[in-house]
Image (spheres, rainbow, N blue to C red):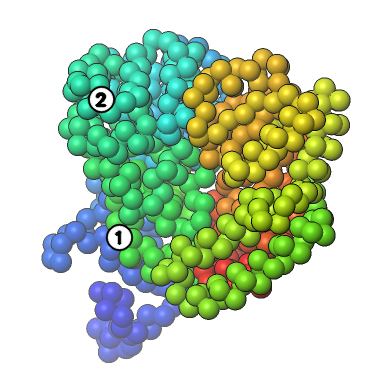
Amino acid sequence: SALSKGETHILLPDGAFFRLDAPDLLGLHRLITEARSLLDRPTGKLAISKFQAGLWDELTTLGGVEHQAAAWKKQIAGLLDSSGIDPVEVPDTLTATLRPYQVDGFRWLNFLRQHSLGGILADDMGLGKTLQTLAMLCAARQSNPAAPPFLIVAPTSVVSNWKSEVAKFAPTLHAAVITDTLRRRRTDLATLVDGADIVVTSYALFRLDNEAYSAVLWSGLVLDEAQFAKNHKSKVHQCARAVDAPFKLAITGTPMENNLMELWSLLAITAPGLFPSPTTFTDIYRNPIEKEGDTERLAQLRRRVKPLMVRRTKEQVAADLPPKQEQILEIELHPSHRAIYETHLQRERQKILGLLDDVDKNRFTILQSLTLLRQLSLDVSLVDEENGPVPSAKVDALVEQLDDVIAGGHRALIFSQFTGFLGSVRARLDAESIPYSYLDGSTRNRGQVLEEFKSGAMPVFLISLKAGGFGLNLTEADYCFILDPWWNPAAEAQAVDRTHRIGQTRNVMVYRLIAKDTIEEKVMALKAKKSALFSNVMDAEGTLGTGLDAEDLRALFE
């Protein structure tokens, strides 16, 4: 009671004073401060969510709680101690042999489902998250064939991949794939999902027909590429929270890309009682960790999250995966290109530096300037066509690399965030008679294009990052070229892992083409900071950098 009131001493019955700043009490004092967010009512007993296994464990360790409910102990035993998860066998209806770490992942998922918990499967990209999830779904149907179906929400480009994966690895499961709005189909959702074990839909359709999806009884909700729901203010996030399902799972190799609130957003869906208030989470964790580098709060956050998130990296569990070698190729702009770039840089710098006092208000204008300078680093024609044809040194360097790659019998993926620049690359490849496949958001025959490359008919695959950064398995390639960097390291990692994933048997070479003395070099430095934020929360010890703030933006223009 004294600690909760902020008192510094206790008066003992014998008249002596007892100090409350003793080291043994500091941990309890921090827990009491955090636990204020757990009170469901101003009066009455303290209510603790079943998702707060780590907090409960610390409270009991400190002696703050003497009587534990048997039901609670049963639910969290497996989360706090892996020995508590039953070593159930992989269902025989799964037509695949799981690796040991995948078996562990399946058992963890099955445990969460059985106890109506939720979590985040955040394994590194390319380690078989879909397969582990399918194993769990097979086990669920075996245990209760009459239960309602599971709803799987995925990016539009990945929906068809789920259908093929189910057919390949879980053929006994009946998957209903929804590819259009209910209004266009002129039928109700209950009719479409009748008799299905799994219902697969896209984030767009889930958002548009959310009222119908929320009205159906589901055994569980699975969000694939769950970073699509990372903004807790977005409609997709709100729809996911509104679905009434006893089990919710987020699948993503990037549970946090930019800041800690994205991690909070996914936990708010899958474990809504863990950090109930975004404001409290910001005050207790985000600000101290991101702005002050508070290592104690960082360690505390890891303990809270650990029971409800599984993440394994390739280095930890896939020792047989061939090595990935990464190299930065610095590209010198042609003199005429350099002169045009510097002219625009000075103009944008003068415009933007005066807007950084209010980043939120001027975010759109700032983003426009950043995008313009990034495009100018690639090809003048993307921004300034009045100066006539100006050669792109980056396209020249790429073609030189491709000549060696193709001559050596290798195959390459080429990624860019700008379809306009991919158009410039296409024109050059046509001029050099280099055959290629092409994929962007407007591609209609996606399956045919993928098969064209996978069959070996084309040695080069041009892919827009937005359309092909996830959901693809392209282990046929062993070279990867990133044409334009951005500060979000997850975007590039998603692209590279289209080829560096389970099934790859050759060394993978990754080249990042960076225009020297341009905004691209500053972007690379900022990306290193964002990567440190992710790795510190998920993996290693250490302090954190800040989010993308005014100082970061100023550094890009200076």
Left or right: 95 in relation to 376: left
Residue at image point 63% right, 17% down: 452
Name the residue that disc number 1 marks: 277
- The amino acid beneath tag 2 is Arg
- Location of residue 419 in the rendering, given as x and y in whole percent from the top left corner: 59, 41
Residue at image point 38% right, 83% down: 19
- Location of residue 91 in the rendering, given as x and y in whole percent from the top left corner: 43, 15
- The amino acid beneath tag 1 is Ser
Closer to the camera, 260 or 22?
A: 260
**Image quarter of residue 156:** top left
Residue at image point 51% right, 56% down: 258
476 versus 209 height, above or below: above
Residue at image point 50% right, 75% down: 355
- Location of residue 465 in the rendering, given as x and y in whole percent from the top left corner: 58, 40
Closer to the camera, 188 or 60?
A: 188
- Location of residue 502 in the rendering, given as x and y in whole percent from the top left corner: 63, 27
Viewer-nearest of discs 2 and 1: 2
Give how far apart the Cα atoms at labels 2 and 1 are.
38 Å
Left or right: 311 in relation to 503: left
Q: Is residue 511 visible?
A: yes
Q: Is residue 314 visible?
A: no
Task: Say if mark 2 contacts mark 1, CB within 8 Å.
Answer: no
Name the residue that disc number 2 marks: 184
365 versus 432 height, above or below: below
